[in-house]
Image (cartoon, rainbow, N blue to C red):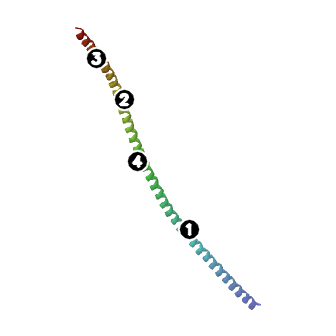
Amino acid sequence: MSRQRRKLSAHSVALWRGRYDNERALKEGVQEALRAIIAETEHAGEAERARHSVVELAVRKEISRENEERLLLKSEVEAQWQHRQKNGEHIEQMAKERDALKGDIEALESKISTMEEERNDSENRKSEL
């Protein structure tokens, strides 16, 4: 029986050793697969960060361009508004001058009318004499 036990024992050891080697190979394979997944995930993360940076830069440029355009439009509107105010003030001043001139014209027309009446009266007196 001892020989049989030794045979069994050697056979068991060989089985256990084979099982151990298989488990170790499986464990190493799993670890290698995990390393590959981690490396791929890190690479994908880096690619996503780079893509995000490109998109962020494009968005910032667009916002900057829109801000510049808005500032340009704002300055144009302000310039037009100031021009309109100046024109409005100028028109107001011209209207006042026109009204003053109308008054002067009316006064002169009245004076001319009076002078014509006086001249007619004077001529009438001359003709009477």
First of labels 2, 4 by sequence position: 4
Q: In this view, does 128 lie to the left or right of 10?
A: left
Judging from the image, what secondary structure is the residue with disc 3 in?
Answer: helix
Labels 3, 1: front one:
3
Q: In this view, does 83 lie to the left or right of 13?
A: left
First of labels 3, 4 by sequence position: 4
- The amino acid at mark 2 is Ala
Give the image location of residue 117, x and y in percent: 29, 15
Judging from the image, what secondary structure is the residue with disc 2 in?
Answer: helix
* Contact between labelled residues 4 and 3, with CB atoms less than 8 Å apart: no
Residue with the most extreme top position:
129
* Disc 2 target residue: 95
The dot on residue 116 is 3
- The amino acid at mark 1 is Thr
Q: Label 2, label 3: how many angstroms apart (C-alpha)? A: 31 Å
Q: Label 2, label 4: how many angstroms apart (C-alpha)? A: 34 Å
Give the image location of residue 74, x and y in percent: 42, 44
Residue visible at 56% across and 73% down in the picture? 36
